[in-house]
Amino acid sequence: MTDPIVKTIAVSASAARAFDIFVNRIGTWWPLDSHAVSASQGQPARDVVIEPRIGGAVYEVMFDGTRADWGQVLAIDPADPWHSPGIRAPTRGLLRASMCVLRIAVRGRQKSP
């Protein structure tokens, strides 16, 4: 496995709301027209799904309705968003898979959900 992908983004929301939007509504903000398997075929994807459970799939619903697997949820805990989700993205085989980890930190004032 390669080194984990680490990305930090500050948002004006509670940790619970940020977690909900990232996990349960990823298809509403993910760039489906450019960062998807469908995009390589000239069409935007229909959706991206994270099944919010350990062992859950992370996948794209392609423009034609077929499924393109992106990865697997290794850890997830909505009650402790500091340490979830951990997603293994099997790019070019499991030995070269990437680990993506989302950590939500509350800073200063936050908006209610």
Image (cartoon, grey):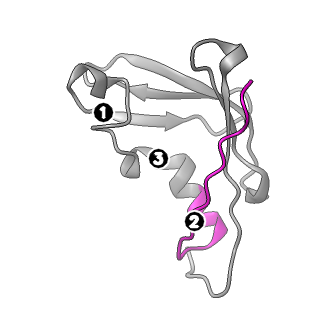
Residue behind mark 3: 26
Could you tell me which residue is drawn at 57 percent across and 14 percent down?
A: 92
Could you give the CA–CA distance between mark 1 and mark 3, rounded to whole angstroms? 12 Å
Residue in front for this viewpoint, 96 or 54: 96
Mark 3: give few (<14), some (14-19) or many (20+) Cα within 10 Å.
Answer: some
* Side of 42 where 11 appears, left or right: right
Q: Which residue lies furthest to the bottom in this view?
A: 109
| Vertical placement of residue 103 versus 61, above or below | below
| Vertical placement of residue 19 versus 66, above or below | below
Quadrant showing the C terminus: bottom right
Query: Callout 2, which amino acid?
Result: Arg
Could you tell me which residue is drawn at 72 percent across and 15 percent down?
A: 95
Residue behind mark 2: 17
Residue behind mark 1: 46
**Which picture quadrant has residue 42?**
top left
Residue at disc 2, secondary structure: helix
Residue in front for this viewpoint, 52 or 98: 98
Query: Callout 1, which amino acid?
Result: Arg
Could you tell me which residue is drawn at 69 percent across and 36 percent down?
A: 53
